[in-house]
Image (cartoon, rainbow, N blue to C red):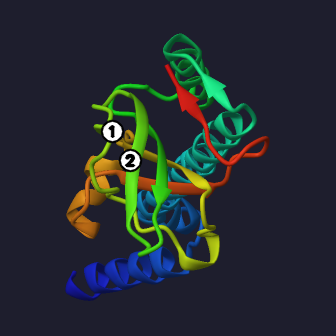
Amino acid sequence: MKSLQYSFGSRLLRRFSEDRAGASAIEFVLLLPFLFLLLAGTVDLGQGLAVQRKMNQIASTSAEMVSMQSSWTRSDISTVLSGVSSILEPYDLTGLTVLICVVEVDTKNKATVVWSAAYGATALSAGQASPFDIPDELQEKDTQMIVTRVQYKLETVFSALFESFTGVRGYEYDRHFFTRPRNSNTISYS
């Protein structure tokens, strides 16, 4: 009787080890979480790169628009800021800050704020020292500089999941853009 059980058990084991019909399903189930994580990471990174491109667009577009005219009104600048902020759509505009600042660099290379306007933040006061370091190669005597700073934090669906791996929740952006006035050496604001 024991040899019959032994023989039946060994045949069953041998048959099970030779049968590969369910192996693919088991391998797929084991790999599925890793494939999902890879897909989620790709989607998350794609969103991060898309927003990075939009941040660069907002910074450069706002500075270039301001540089095109020698005189601006508060309502015109408000319209510009509202318009460039829409570049970020369809992403949430909450937390987006855009700062446009016109600075003047004196002969001692000290930059001072001439005027400033902001979206989602507080504008800088005229006469205060510029919080931005103007690159030496961009400074020109008796010419103002337009500086834009765009900041944003993107939290995606998967950023909470990846926080345990990366230690960071979401993506943080801080972009600057520098340019000079196009039609005159100064830009007025009233």
Q: Position of residue 118 (x, y in %)?
A: 40, 30
Name the mark on residue 126.
Answer: 1
Q: In this rendering, is residue 169 above or below 99?
A: below
Give, as a three-letter code, the residue at label 2. Answer: Val
Cα distance between the residues tagged 1 and 2: 5 Å
Q: Position of residue 67 (x, y in %)?
A: 69, 41
Q: Quarter of the image holding residue 18?
A: bottom right
Name the mark on residue 118.
Answer: none
Q: Secondary structure at mark 2?
A: strand
| Pointer 2 residue | 113
Give, as a three-letter code, the residue at label 1. Answer: Ala
Residue at 72% x, 31% y: name it: 69
Q: Secondary structure at mark 1?
A: loop
Q: Categorize mark 2 by other alpha carbons within 10 Å: few (<14), some (14-19), many (20+).
A: many
Residue at 53% x, 25% y: name it: 81
| Outermost residue to the right | 183
Q: Position of residue 22 (x, y in %)?
A: 53, 62
Q: Position of residue 155 (x, y in %)?
A: 35, 42
Front residue of this view, candidates 7 and 127: 127
